Image (cartoon, rainbow, N blue to C red):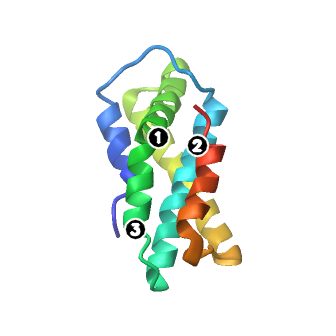
């Protein structure tokens, strides 16, 4: 089982603090869902013989600041509600697990247009909130 990039980012961000955020808590959660869909879609396409992991990696790097801000915003919401650092991390991990399940279930039902994976990711780019 591989470790989610989101969990690695979450741990890194536990040691950083930034008091203001440009996006809402709801938008941050939505952004994290899109990143889960994108990552799982790459796995789905790779398993079907379509090289997509490198396409996803480049896309993720392009939007890494959006992803980082979303993680920070979720952690900050927990902090504003009085959660300890450990509790904040636990909430983030659970939220990501829920997003992963939702994305996985949806991909299993609908599939992914693997032959057009790059364009598929461009669709997610348009949905990200900054």
Question: Which label number is shown at residue 5?
Answer: none
Q: Which residue is mark 3?
A: 53
Q: Which is nearer the N-term, disc 1 or disc 2? A: 2
Query: Could you tell me which residue is drawn at 46 percent across and 72 percent down?
Result: 43
Q: Which is nearer the N-term, disc 2 or disc 3? A: 2
Q: Position of residue 39 (x, y in %)?
A: 48, 61
- Which quadrant: the N terminus? bottom left
Q: Residue furthest top?
A: 19
Whether residues under marks 3 and 1 lie with C-beta atoms below 8 angstroms apart, the answer is no
Whether residues under marks 2 and 3 lie with C-beta atoms below 8 angstroms apart, the answer is no
Marks 2 and 3 sit apart, C-alpha to C-alpha, by 19 Å
Whether residues under marks 1 and 2 lie with C-beta atoms below 8 angstroms apart, the answer is yes
Q: Which residue is mark 2?
A: 31
- Residue 6 appears anywhere in the view: no
Quadrant of the rendered image containing residue 126: top right
Q: Position of residue 42 (x, y in %)?
A: 48, 68
Circle 1 residues within 10 Å: few <14, some 14–19, many ≥20: many
């Amino acid at each position: 089982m591989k470790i989610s990039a989101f969990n690695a980012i979450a741990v890194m961000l536990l040691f950083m603090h930034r008091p203001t955020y440009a996006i809402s808590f709801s938008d941050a959660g939505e952004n994290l869902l899109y990143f889960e869909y994108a990552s799982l879609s790459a796995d789905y396409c790779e398993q079907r013989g379509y090289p997509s992991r490198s396409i996803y990696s480049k896309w993720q790097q392009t939007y890494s600041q959006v992803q980082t801000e979303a993680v920070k915003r979720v952690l900050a919401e927990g902090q504003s509600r009085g959660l300890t650092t450990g509790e904040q991390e636990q909430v983030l991990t659970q939220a990501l697990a829920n997003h992963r399940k939702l994305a996985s279930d949806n991909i299993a039902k609908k599939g992914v247009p693997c032959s057009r994976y790059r364009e598929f990711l461009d669709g997610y780019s348009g949905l990200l909130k900054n």
